[in-house]
Image (tube, coloured by chain):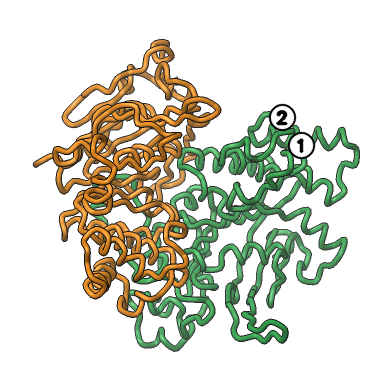
Amino acid sequence: MTDSQFLVEVRNLVKHFPVLRGILIQRQVGTVRAVDGISFSITNGETLGLVGESGCGKTTAGRTLLGLYPATDGQIMIDGQDLRKARGAKMMAIRRKAQIIFQDPYASLNPRWTISAIISEPLRVHHLLSNPQERTDRVRELLRLVGLSPSHLNRFPHEFSGGQRQRIGVARALASDPKFIVCDEPISALDVSIQAQVVNLLEDLQDRLGLTYLFIAHDLSMVRHICDRVAVMYLGVIVELADRDELYDHPLHPYTTALLSAVPIPDPKKDRERRRIILVGDVPSPLNPPPGCRFHPRCPIAIERCHQDIPEWRKVAMGHWVACHLVR
Amino acid sequence: MTILLDVKDLKTRFHTPEGNVYAVNGVSFNLDEGGTLAVVGESGCGKSVTMMSLLRLIPIPPGEIVSGSVHYRGKDLLKLKEDDLQSDIRGKEIAMVFQDPMTSLNPVLSIGRQLTEPLRVHLNYDPKQARRRAIELLELVGIPDPKKRLGDYPHQFSGGMRQRVMIAMALACSPTLLIADEPTTALDVTIQAQIIELVKELRDKIGLSIIWITHDLGVVAGLAQHVIVMYAGFIVEEADVDTLYESPRHPYTLALMAALPHAERRRETRLKSIPGAPPNLLVEPSGCPFAPRCDYVVDKCKTLNPPLKIIGNDHSIACWVDVKAREPQ
């Protein structure tokens, strides 16, 4: 296995946030185990989906992966570079190659900046194209690339709709010519018809520019559409990872099964026929995750062993990994 | 079956400095007692304003209900005195649940206080009675340990739990009709499934009539009996749920369906998106509002707005074109 096969490799990534108390003398009273040891790799040109309920740590995982949060432990390799060891110019080089599209197109664009200033920020930060004319040309090119008119250059974010704003976010992420983009729920704030536009745009850009995506989402139907492989996350750990069709056709982990059964089917007859597994309660607090298998308090088939032993992360078929005691 | 709610030719406008916003343009529908109606459409299609207009909850001015009638059990809600509407209808007969459970609860009042308020205002319960009923309600919507949670504040509840509290609050005075405005949009799929199951259960248990507003055709399929599709303040298609999903006939409904990815279907090459953006409601509608984005558009569509016409058993569309007979362009 050569290094070039994987663009992104994550091993045993841990991100804990300390909970502090006290004003002058702060002491740590707890730890939020947002991401608690996850491993995956993404090959060049692939889209890996990361799905889970809110609060399962998927956004934290994406941000830690890019160094936006310093990791607590583990290894992150992006394009052969160790992100956790990189400093200064090396870090900047990695950041140029790895970008992010944020979830909320309303909050992620500075309302006082023009579109031109927003999209050219990565160019300024990375000292690319110092000539102002070249920069403007690049911004125009990016606007065209994401399907907006280059004449929108000097407008402000409030003049655009949600879908258009998300396109601006995409243009900004593309400005520094990255190889890898973390898409942090880029469509969940949009209407269904606009979602399709943005997803199509992301797919086109991937084909044209050879991009690699980590696609974070909670909408399982869209994930099946856009991703090649899917990882299911629950309370800071990945519980199942498999090829898209394998995961949807033969889900093994009870959490994946429940998650899939909760997806609404736009067909009244099928919806009536199918058996829904309704999970009780919410995701427990990552401040104090349950012992043993983290899913056991909500698991419909949990046995005694699940309460104590942490299930091993193992390969059950070609490219299909799962962490559950009950999967043979 | 008796008709519970009968809305005829409802028109709502907003007078703004930029001009008139034509939000609702002649909407008519009715709801049977115990029925479930879904209203589907993109943001800004007028679905929420329609429901707010029913209860006269839109701010006047800038809003204005230009015409129409809303008959609820024979009474025209638009002609009722404000005081009577407030004391007899809102919350008591017709209750609403809003989209965002994070912002529609008062953060500085305990859940118990917010739950008992409608009981004391509408039903003149004394504090003890109100408290007992509040516990009952929390139990009904499946909140564990309701006695203890009554003193908790909204931030101590998760999103799904807050939405349950909102539903409990709406159910406080045993309304006949529940209007739910995108109640699951802000929630995870698993929690969404919980809430939908809960609403179905309530419908069967206490015979609630429901109007469910959403932009997601997927959610509606398992819940509604009857569906209205709205676009730019007009109803463009109306049918019972099976007919609508089996043979949608309005180009907009077709486009909405095509834009949905199917979790149980394998990846198609591309999602079909609807080109362009929803229309500008500042312009007085002339011609079919969907014409600029429509695949089936003919010349007539640009000048004449098609009326809603019946095309089959319980199925109406507002379109000049027969999508079955014509190829999309």
**Does any portion of residue A253 appear in the rendered image?**
no
In the displayed structure, B323 sits above or below B126; it is: above
* Cα gap from disc 1 to disc 2, whole angstroms: 8 Å
Residue assigned mark 1: A139
* Residue lying at 24% horizontally and 29% vertically, measured from the top left: B8
Left or right: residue A246 compared with residue A202:
left
* Palette colour of chain B: orange
Quadrant of residue B10 within the rendered picture: top left
Which residue type carries mark 2?
Pro
The quadrant the C terminus of chain B occupies is top left
* Palette colour of chain A: green
> Which of these two is toward me, A120 or B174?
B174
- Which of the chains bears the disc numbered 2? A
Q: Indicate which disc, 1 or 2, sits on the residue closer to the N terminus.
A: 1
The quadrant the N terminus of chain B occupies is top left
Which residue type carries mark 1?
Val
Left or right: residue A147 compared with residue B224:
right
Residue assigned mark 2: A150
> Which of these two is toward me, B287 or B56?
B56
* Residue lying at 49% horizontally and 64% vertically, measured from the top left: A54
Local SS, label 2:
helix
Residue B305 placement (x, y as % from top left): 36, 17
- Residue A268: image tag: none
